[in-house]
Image (cartoon, rainbow, N blue to C red):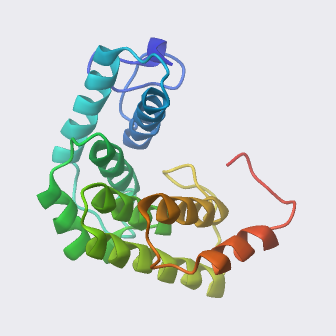
Amino acid sequence: ILANQGAEGGFGLWGPGSGDFWLDAYVTDFLSRAKAQGYAVPEQALKSALSNLRNQVNYAPDFNAETNDGGTALAYALMVLAREGAAAIGDLRYFADIKGDDFATPLAQAQLGAALASYGDQSRADAMFRKAGARIDALTTTAEAQVWRADYGTSYRDVAAVLTLAVEAGSNAIDREELTDRIARQGSTLSTQ
């Protein structure tokens, strides 16, 4: 994995590279979780990856649910940074209070909720989880003609991730049983996600 890390801290798919904000958040999340589980992660590599995420957050363009990536990479990066104590709480509160409805996916909303919970702002975290739950309900009532997403995701993955993040964050703002049932009803048609 670290052989694909570029000098600025970002990651490439097939070699050192940068430019995929979501991929950078994903790999940094993996490294952070591996370190938390006691695996040897070189400190400089993780510091560089976190610094790269902070830079990308600082220069992220404005978004709404229909533009850019709908804030999906930004939400993921904020969650990873918050778990490492490296996010600005003011940024998290701004995105929750002003841009909470503008995230394109329920997963992005839940990731922001998880970030807020990491900093102890449970009321805003719960508000974001409620938004994620409402977005999941909306996906059920509309036909989703999805071919490609910037965050490599599917609505099925979003439901599983929202449930997981809510449990990790200690949020009861979503109906955990309903989400569990929804996942179980998916059946045997699965993607690589």
- In this rendering, the answer to whether 70 lies above or below 140 is above
Q: Residue at 30% of width from left, 50% of height from top?
A: 78
Q: Does residue 49 appear anywhere in the picture?
A: yes
Q: Position of residue 167 (x, y in %)?
A: 51, 63
- In this rendering, the answer to whether 5 lies above or below 130 is above
Left or right of 49: which side holds 3? right
Q: Residue at 60% of width from left, 67% of height from top?
A: 159
- In this rendering, the answer to whether 76 lies above or below 43 is below
Q: Position of residue 14 (x, y in %)?
A: 54, 20
- In this rendering, the answer to whether 173 lies above or below 113 is below
Left or right of 78: which side holds 111? right
Q: Nearer the viewer, residue 66 or 178?
A: 178
Q: Nearer the viewer, residue 141 or 29?
A: 29
Q: Residue at 71% of width from left, 75% of height from top?
A: 182
Left or right of 121: which side holds 127? right
Name of the residue lying farthest toward the right? 188
Q: Quadrant of residue 64?
A: bottom left
Q: Position of residue 151 (x, y in %)?
A: 50, 51
Q: Residue at 43% of width from left, 38% of height from top?
A: 29
Q: Quadrant of residue 44?
A: top left
Q: Nearer the viewer, residue 83 or 141?
A: 83
Q: How many marks?
A: 0
Q: Position of residue 39 (x, y in %)?
A: 50, 21
